[in-house]
């Protein structure tokens, strides 16, 4: 028998090998197509809805800028060569900045960031077809960082508005804007997280993405793959001033609500109910005997405020507002602030684990910040005692101290052990102790020390505290025996 196969067999094998290679290439192409979305159609359709914004601001001369010197002054040439390089007018200098925006109305209404047009003397808008307009600032809201501007034009292409609530973490999103002055630049990434709280701002549930956002992208739209705007690119986290993978966008529902109010009345009103709230942690939920760690714990109620008038009390856990779940303490300010002042809402609470409903008339949140926290009427120093099981050294209050604090009963915190990690400070006053959902009014140091001694070794305890004019809750567990 021949050791060699006939030539026809080689031909057949070659055909089979070619077919397998073709199938492999097709499979790879399908995988690439499925894994990497095509943004070309989105860019072609939505690109014209995005605008470039150039802002000019007049700057008064100061000692830090080029001084007013006659040309024959010996220092004139020095400052001319080495002084600040600003474009000068006859009486003032000019600062220029750039940003992005998007058209929400075919009649010329455009949304951008408030910080883009802040302090602007002139705002110029450039469309993708190179038409230029001078825009009027209708209004700006620094709290949400949203501004509404308008150009004198009609028949403009406008964006489609999406639903941020339907947005999922991991979903592809794209941004179009003017980073570093480069008009109509598209960048892509995914949604990294939703409902982010950022320092200094608790009313905006930011969308976090890894889309490349740089200076000049501010105010531009964040699109989903349907070509709908679901956010307004607002800020980045950066140690260098450039993109580092952390970008944040204002949800479009927040932006459109702000823009609508700016259009109608030139300013934004927000609701408030007059409560101080805290997070319901696992330990707090256990001490209050709650089934789950969710909701907003009412730490204080403003006397005569909307919540107080409705009957809401300190220690209540707000679970719903008009049927909308309050999952965490961060949810409540966002929900309430979006309610128009004067509106009646139903707030559902758990009071000692019993559900109750209250009808609250929302009042207006003022822009002015509250007065600084005051510390007064705290206990006076005495001989140091041994910390109790909770790591607290307690002392009784005098009648004069109680009168000054405006309380009937309470026990002062004189000091605490170094291993106490709860939000308790010397000078705080304990008003009540809650364990297994049962509150006990604080009447004396001996009473509380005895109560703490009888608690389960691992049971968390929630203290209702008064610090200055504020009331709040702090939860802690008994200290380990070797630390007592």
Image: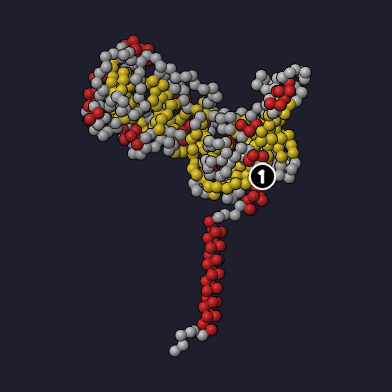
| Above/below status of 82 relative to 194 | above
Residue pointed to by mark 1: 184
Please state, as top left, top right, bottom left or bottom right, where the N terminus lies in the image: bottom left
Q: Residue at x 22, y 28 (%)?
A: 454
- Residue 319 rendering spot, x and y as whole percentages: 41, 35
Secondary structure beneath dot 1 equals loop
* Residue occupying the point 49% across, 84% down: 5
- The reply to whether residue 434 is visible in this rendering is no
Residue 360 visible? The answer is yes
Is residue 276 placed above or below 113 in the rendered structure? above
Residue at 52% from the left image edge and 45% from the top image edge: 191
Q: Quadrant of residue 352?
A: top left
Does residue 352 lie above or below 8 as drawn?
A: above
Label 1 crowd (10 A; few <14 / some 14-19 / many >=20): many
Q: Vertically, is 28 above or below 364?
A: below
Q: Residue furthest top?
A: 400
Q: Along the horizontal axis of the image, is 79 left or right of 24?
A: right
Q: Identify the image quadrant of residue 429.
A: top left
Q: Is residue 336 left or right of residue 109?
A: left
Q: Residue 381: where, in percent of width, then height?
A: 31, 14
At x 27%, y 17%, the residue is 384
Residue 468 appears in which quarter of the rendering? top left
Q: Please tell me which residue lies in front, 367 or 69.
A: 69
Residue ranking furthest to the front: 74
| Residue 341 rendering spot, x and y as whole percentages | 54, 28
Q: Which quarter of the figure is the C terminus placed in? A: top left
Q: How many marks?
A: 1
């Amino acid at each position: 028998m021949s050791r060699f196969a006939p030539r026809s067999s080689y031909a057949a094998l070659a055909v089979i090998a070619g077919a397998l290679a073709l199938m492999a290439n097709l499979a790879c192409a399908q995988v690439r197509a499925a894994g990497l979305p095509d943004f070309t159609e989105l860019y072609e359709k939505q690109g014209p809805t995005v605008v470039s914004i150039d802002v000019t601001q007049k700057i008064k001369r100061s000692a830090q800028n080029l001084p007013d010197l006659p040309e024959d002054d010996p220092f004139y040439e020095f400052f001319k060569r080495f002084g600040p390089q600003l474009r000068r007018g006859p009486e003032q200098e000019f600062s220029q900045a750039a940003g992005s925006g998007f058209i929400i109305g075919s009649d010329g209404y455009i949304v951008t960031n408030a910080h883009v047009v802040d302090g602007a003397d002139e705002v110029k808008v450039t469309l993708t077809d190179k038409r230029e307009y001078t825009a009027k600032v209708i209004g700006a809201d620094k709290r949400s960082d949203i501004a509404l501007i308008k150009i004198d034009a009609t028949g403009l292409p406008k964006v489609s508005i999406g639903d941020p609530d339907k947005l999922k973490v991991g979903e592809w999103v794209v941004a179009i804007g003017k980073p570093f002055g480069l008009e109509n630049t598209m960048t892509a990434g995914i949604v990294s997280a939703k409902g982010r709280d950022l320092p200094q701002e608790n009313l905006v549930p930011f969308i976090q993405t890894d889309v490349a956002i740089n200076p000049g992208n501010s105010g531009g739209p964040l699109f989903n793959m349907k070509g709908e705007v679901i956010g307004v690119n607002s800020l980045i986290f950066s140690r260098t001033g450039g993109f580092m993978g952390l970008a944040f966008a204002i949800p479009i529902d927040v932006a459109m609500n702000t823009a609508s109010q700016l259009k109608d009345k030139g300013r934004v009103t927000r609701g408030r109910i007059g409560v101080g709230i805290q997070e319901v942690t696992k330990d707090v939920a256990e001490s209050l005997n709650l089934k789950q760690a969710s909701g907003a714990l009412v730490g204080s109620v403003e006397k005569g405020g909307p919540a107080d008038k409705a009957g809401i009390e300190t220690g209540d856990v707000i679970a719903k507002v008009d049927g909308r779940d309050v999952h965490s303490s961060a949810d409540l300010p966002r929900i309430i602030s979006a309610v128009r002042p004067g509106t009646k809402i139903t707030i559902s609470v758990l009071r000692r684990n019993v559900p109750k409903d209250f009808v609250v008339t929302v009042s207006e949140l003022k822009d002015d910040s509250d007065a600084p926290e005051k510390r007064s009427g705290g206990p006076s120093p005495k001989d140091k005692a041994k910390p109790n099981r909770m790591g607290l050294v307690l002392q009784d209050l005098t009648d004069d101290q109680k009168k000054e604090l405006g309380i009937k009963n309470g026990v002062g915190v004189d000091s605490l052990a170094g291993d106490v990690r709860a939000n308790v400070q010397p000078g705080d006053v304990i008003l009540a102790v809650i364990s297994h959902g049962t509150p006990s009014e604080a009447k004396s140091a001996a009473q509380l020390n005895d109560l703490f001694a009888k608690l389960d070794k691992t049971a968390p305890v929630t203290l209702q505290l008064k610090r200055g004019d504020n009331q709040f809750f702090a939860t802690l567990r008994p200290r380990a025996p070797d630390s007592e």
